[in-house]
Image (spheres, grey):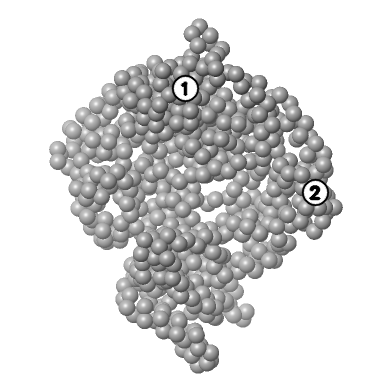
Amino acid sequence: MKWNDHLLLWNHAAVSIMDIRYTVMMAGEAQHGYRLPSSGFLYAIKGAARIGMDGSLHEARRFHVLHGGKGTYLDILAEEDGFHFYLLLYRATLPSSGRPQWQKLMEESNPFLLQYGFVPMHSALLYEQVTQMKQLWEQERLLDRLKLKGIFYQFVQELLGQIHENSLPLIQEDYTAQVIRYIEANYTEALTLLDLAELMGSSPRSLSRRFKQATGYSPIDYMLRLRMEKAKELLVSTDATLEEIALGIGYPDGYYFGRMFKKYTGMSPIRFKQKVIRKQLRPYLTSELAGYDIFPKKIGRYISSDNDYHYIRGGTVRMRRSTRSGMALTLLLSLTLLLGACSGGAGDNRVNGGNSGGVSEVNGTKAVQGVVNSTQTPNKTSSPRIISTVMGDIEVPVHPKRVVVDWHLGQVLALGMTPVGASSLNLQYGKFLTPLIKEKIEDIGKSGSISLEKVLELEPDLIITWDQKAYESYSKIAPTVVFQEYPSIQEEMTAMGQILNRQEEAKRWLTEFEQRVEVAQNKIKKVVPENATFTAVNYILGKKVIILGSKAVYKILGLKPDPEVKRDILDPNKPSIDVSWEQASDYVGDYVFIMQNADSPAVELPNVWTTLDAIKNKRFYDLDVTKYFAHDPLSVLLQAEEIASKLTERASGK
């Protein structure tokens, strides 16, 4: 929002102090999902913590200030020295007699809901103000409360002045994500649109309009669908009565629930349960069951950012993931047991290839932690192959046709196969791979919330995952291989060739890979001084600079890192580090590669950055983060080739 509008609303709003708290967290202590009851400032005074605010991650240390609006969810993890902080909660409202344009400004961009965080100057002054406010809050005299409000305004004035002076970014809270999170945590309660609007400090009309623009559904419709999908799960997975299910999802009785369920699905709860159970008893339970997904395809889970408490940090970041079993896996349990009983003797006929350990020789190289050996019965192409993995010996098809991957899209595409399903993160942030996709790949969900029902619907004959924890769920759908990390691209692609039974394709790809890398390296040598240093950064978030340990830049192209990058990132094998704008100058080399997202708002760059030698002399290159997030061998090869082309084109004046 415009700065003058921000100040105008602060000047005309009536501010009430709601609470002032002082909290001490011990090392490793965590608070999860605390919802701010009103707008507030968090002021750190000792120790450090990692703080999540509705998807934005902050590393808070002494005198760090954070601001969030009503409804903001806080997740706090205290680090080794513990974490001491004050929480100043306040409510700001415009007078009913105020000008109409003020109310319009509040609707469009409410300054009391903005998120920001930084370490301000004059920390001693601010600390004194905060401690004095805490002391006054504990007094009951009206005169003390009046003095408290005056000091609060001085505190706010000092912070806003520093924000304006240093051009710090102000982030509008993800309003819709907050509403969804509240609905999903409280759908068992009798919520109304008015309740939600009051919780969010909005009018029902404004809430409904903004929510529908973001999701396609009204808040109440979204809650209805969520309740119905939870009801489906309870109907199929438990013996709960209609009355028990009704009370469990927020309806007053079984009769009302039955009416709503039939209106939503077109059939009564009992008929729905009988229909699903009949399908469960069929010998081949595949795509028919997928019609009863836990969550409808049209809704999805609204998340405005794929970061999910993670920064997008180019091609080397590893996202933290987890999986959740769905209704379809429960239905498959009896089928799995039946099939397991029928094939129980198959293990006696398996060929282990003489190696059951975690390491074996694969084409002259050691395959560590992943697939280590594979054999197949000679002259019987219909027989399954046996491969040894970290999860034990696994039967896989001789020639997989319908492969699902939840992470390793590039490796599979490199060997000439298009998976039938992949995670949305791969599809959205692996744009170098898009032109290579010859057939449609279905989106199986975001990392951390893969839809097992969608995977089941695709009828895969092989699933390749990075996640050991997901193995049990996936293996009930199809043979599943846990594909772990490898120390080299050669070993990684050789192992993938074994899994897909495309060993020759893997050899050919590796030969071509080495040739193309050599061409790219030679192009750069012709246009870049021998001892030039390089740095890869990302400043999408605007608040700080992320220094990246780019695989394409340093490992593939072999470019020389800035000494500080080598010391702090490459030598300790870190994917990245976060630094302030002031610290960034210590890491910036002669050339800079900047990962940017074209869809993100422009970042106003401070003078300390724009005056760096590499920036002033235009030795920086913008790279699309949707191409450079992926770090599979195929993506990093294409990244390396584009980097080489950008350097040579700039040198030739193109």
| Label 1 environment density (alpha carbons within 10 Å; few <14, some 14–19, many ≥20) | many
Task: Say above or below: 18 vs 601.
Answer: below
* Residue 629, quarter of picture: top left
Q: Position of residue 261 (x, y in %)?
A: 79, 47
Reading the image, the residue beneath label 2 is 241
The kind of secondary structure element at disc 2 is loop
Q: Position of residue 346 (x, y in %)?
A: 58, 18
Identity of the amino acid at label 1?
Answer: Ile
Residue sitting at x 46%, y 68%: 67
Q: Position of residue 318 (x, y in %)?
A: 41, 43
Asked whether disc 1 touches disc 2, contact meaning CB atoms under 8 Å apart, the reply is: no
Direction from residue 124 to residue 248 in the image, left or right: right
Residue sitting at x 27%, y 23%: 515
What is the spatial separation of the Cα atoms under label 1 and label 2, in whole angstroms? Answer: 45 Å
Direction from residue 440 to residue 353 in the image, left or right: left
Task: Say above or below: 354 vs 527.
Answer: above
Q: Residue furthest top?
A: 379
Q: Is residue 537 visible?
A: no
